[in-house]
Amino acid sequence: GESVGLHLPTLSVQEGDNSIINCAYSNSASDYFIWYKQESGKGPQFIIDIRSNMDKRQGQRVTVLLNKTVKHLSLQIAATQPGDSAVYFCAETLMDSSYKLIFGSGTRLLVRP
Amino acid sequence: DTAVSQTPKYLVTQMGNDKSIKCEQNLGHDTMYWYKQDSKKFLKIMFSYNNKELIINETVPNRFSPKSPDKAHLNLHINSLELGDSAVYFCASSHFGSVSYNEQFFGPGTRLTVL
């Protein structure tokens, strides 16, 4: 079985509640940010992105907030469902020619039925 | 339909061996990546190829050598495997400079265990 990720920060929420996952990014020059979801045994999956000229972007049940002043990103998930249980990563990059993503350390979201 | 596929899914081998992991994407992307995810789930870029040319080469031991025979394939060869190479390796692909800026599609991962 998988024994990785035991030391990940964990957020436990009741099904139906809203979840907020936070991320501090490292480079004040980063101008593009992405949230990924990684389910057990799978690769990361794109959820939502935001450019640095915005401070909020909404998707289906998800909202990303960007605060450049304090280099902080958050992912809000409305009406959290059991299928939302996963590890969530934020990633930052610069819109230059390298397209190199720098990933944050991840947060495990556990949804209690 | 599988978008980004990797083989093998699991690889268990002895220290000192040489092994390869293969990656293929059928998305028509022109940029492919290799990432390493350690036991703490930390995900780090290793290499990136755009149109078969190396564009990102992070501080990775030269025992690791990526090879891109064409735009749809990016393989990773590892020589003289060490215990610390044990990790999950993810391949990803994207369009270079796409409108959905850098949406990278990840493969399912290859769990490498070095004994």
Image (cartoon, coloured by chain):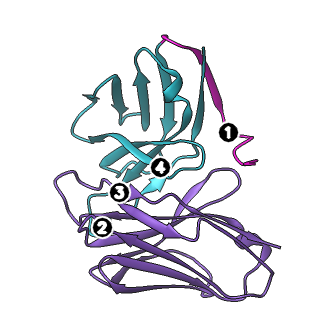
Name the residue beneath numbered marker 2: B26
Q: Amino acid at mark 4?
A: Pro
Residue B16's quadrant in the figure?
Answer: bottom right
Q: Alpha carbon of mark 3 to alpha carbon of mark 1: how far?
A: 23 Å
Residue B1's quadrant in the figure?
Answer: bottom left
- Residue A96 image offset from top left, x and y in percent: 27, 64
| Magenta highlight on residue A18 | no
Range shown magenta: A1-17
Q: Alpha carbon of mark 1 to alpha carbon of mark 4: how far?
A: 16 Å
Q: Nearer the viewer, mark 3 or mark 1?
A: 3
At a point 42% along the width and 78% down the height, the residue shown is: B74
Q: Amino acid at mark 2?
A: Asn
Q: Are marks 1 and 4 in contact (CB under 8 Å)?
A: no
Q: Earlier in the sequence, mark 1 or mark 4?
A: 1
Name the residue beneath numbered marker 3: B104
Q: Which chain is purple?
A: B
Name the residue beneath numbered marker 1: A8
Q: Which chain is cyan?
A: A
Q: Are marks 2 and 1 in contact (CB under 8 Å)?
A: no
Give the mark count: 4
Judging from the image, mark 3 belongs to the subunit labelled: B
Name the residue beneath numbered marker 4: A44
Task: Give left or right: position of B95 versus B23.
Answer: left
Q: Amino acid at mark 3?
A: Gln
Q: Nearer the viewer, residue B6 or B61?
A: B6
Q: Nearer the viewer, mark 2 or mark 1?
A: 2
